[in-house]
Image (cartoon, rainbow, N blue to C red):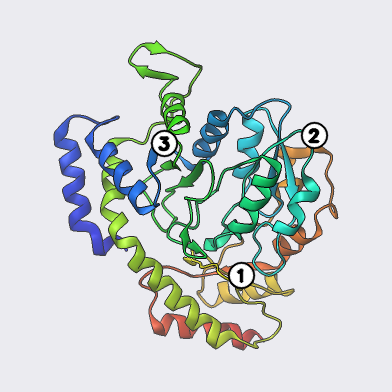
């Protein structure tokens, strides 16, 4: 990926370097405009990372102590942390057993008088069933914040991820489909008031230098990362298509092999295949076999948030969210990136088949 765009990346680096303006300048403004256009939203605000993007979004909505935020039981811990950092309580909801995304049919059971917002996470690259989630939010007068970190460029019934919620958060961590050369993130919204609040919060609570309206934080997407992301943005759709082509090859060749469960797309939903996740009851043994044969894999994620030491105060135990636990014990992410060659795909497939 980086070989393909290296000349343009070097030009962008040199332009920022020579500008002598490294925070809150033209590169950020340009990228925000282009990313908003890509996301089909009126506004985008660059921030330091994806976690800050969710925190700032919650703060802009006024979510805080005493409030509850519905989150997936099956997600990276950042989703829960964001609710915790604003003083709210994360309320987990189990995923759909096929897509691994939050199950819309279970959300209403988790809503209480304290519920303020829902954070659907587009896990592994597949957009959640957002039409259903938005209908529930409207019915119960709740805010929606999409966690779009893994799914830039995906769609639910023709509408792009990052454009459904009241305000939405994304990450440009280097491993993402649109990845910076370091930590980076952004917020998207159609709401001008929320956009302005987010911009103030990310900049120490200030619009005008040295004049602070609220207690903000320092979370600004720097000029260099903005410029480099702007080089990658026009290429991302072609990279996403290549990921889909690779996923199709994996799925066609691995269908019916052993006890493997392959990725499943909900009706009307697309995926950018940020990850290609298979499941098997023999996950650890298969991972060892692949490692011994030179195939790197990862587990996304080995421990659900409710079983993390960080959330011991919630007194949640093994068995409380069995589906999230089952996914954590059986999931395995195969190599997935633009540039993965057919012979490499075939080797991975044959190595898996040899295991069974």
In what quadrant of the picture does the C terminus appear?
bottom right
Residue at which label 2 appears: 313
Q: Residues within 10 Å of mark 3 (few under 14, many from 20)?
A: many
Marked residue nearer the N-terminal end (1 or 2):
1
Residues at circles 3 and 2 in contact by the CB criterion of under 8 Å = no
Q: Is residue 350 visible?
A: no
Residue 51 image position (x, y, % from top left): 53, 39
- Whether residue 304 is situated above or below residue 354 in the rendered picture: above
Q: Which mark, by number, is residue 266?
A: 1
Percent coordinates x, y for residue 256 in the rendering: 65, 88
Can you tell which of label 3 and label 2 is closer to the viewer? 3
Query: How packed is label 2: few (under 14 Cα within 10 Å), some, or many (20 or more)?
Result: few
Q: Residue at x 38, y 11 (%)?
A: 211
> Tag 3 or tag 1, which sits nearer the N-term?
3
Going by the image, does 245 lie left or right of 96? left
Q: Are marks 1 and 2 in contact (CB under 8 Å)?
A: no
The residue depicted at 39 percent of the width and 37 percent of the height is 45
Residue under numbered circle 3? 47
Disc nearest the viewer among 1 and 2: 1
Q: Residue furthest front?
A: 139
Q: Element type at marker 1?
A: loop
Res 220 quadrant in image:
top left
Label 1 or label 3, whichever lies nearer to me, is: 1
Image location (x, y in percent) of residue 149: 50, 51
Please say if 340 is above or below 30.
Answer: below
In space, the residues marked 1 and 2 are separated at their CA atoms by: 35 Å
Q: Is residue 12 left or right of 88 when viewed as pictured?
A: left
Q: Secondary structure at mark 2?
A: helix
């Amino acid at each position: 990926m980086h070989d393909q765009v290296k000349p343009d990346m070097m030009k962008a680096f040199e332009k920022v370097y020579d500008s002598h303006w490294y925070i809150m300048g033209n590169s950020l403004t340009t990228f925000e405009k282009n990313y908003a256009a890509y996301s089909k939203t009126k506004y985008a605000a660059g921030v330091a990372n994806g976690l800050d993007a969710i925190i700032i979004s919650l703060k802009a909505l006024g979510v805080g102590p005493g409030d509850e935020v519905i989150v997936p039981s099956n997600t990276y811990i950042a989703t829960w942390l964001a609710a915790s950092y604003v003083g709210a309580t994360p309320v987990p909801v189990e995923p759909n057993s096929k897509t691994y995304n939050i199950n819309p049919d279970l959300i209403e059971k988790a809503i209480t008088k304290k519920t303020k917002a829902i954070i659907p996470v587009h896990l592994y690259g597949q957009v959640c069933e957002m039409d259903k989630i938005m209908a529930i939010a409207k019915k119960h007068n709740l805010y929606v914040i999409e966690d779009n970190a893994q799914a830039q460029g995906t769609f639910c019934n023709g509408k792009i991820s990052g454009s459904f919620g009241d305000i939405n958060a994304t990450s440009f961590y280097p491993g993402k489909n649109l990845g910076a050369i370091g930590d980076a993130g952004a917020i998207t919204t159609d709401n001008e008031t929320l956009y302005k609040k987010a911009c103030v919060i990310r900049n120490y609570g200030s619009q005008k230098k040295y004049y602070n309206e609220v207690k903000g934080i320092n979370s600004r997407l720097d000029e260099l990362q903005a410029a480099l992301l702007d080089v990658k943005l026009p290429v991302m759709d072609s990279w996403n298509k290549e990921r889909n082509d690779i996923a199709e090859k994996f799925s066609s060749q691995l269908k019916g092999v052993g006890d493997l469960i392959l990725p499943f797309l909900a009706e009307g939903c697309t995926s950018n295949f940020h990850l290609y996740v298979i499941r098997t009851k023999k996950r650890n043994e298969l991972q060892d076999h692949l490692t011994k044969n030179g195939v790197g894999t990862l587990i996304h994620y080995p421990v659900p948030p409710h079983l993390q030491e960080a959330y011991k105060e919630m007194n949640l135990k093994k068995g409380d969210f069995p589906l999230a636990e089952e996914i954590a014990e059986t999931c395995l992410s195969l190599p997935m990136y633009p540039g993965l060659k057919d012979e490499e795909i075939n080797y991975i497939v044959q190595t898996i088949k040899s295991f069974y």
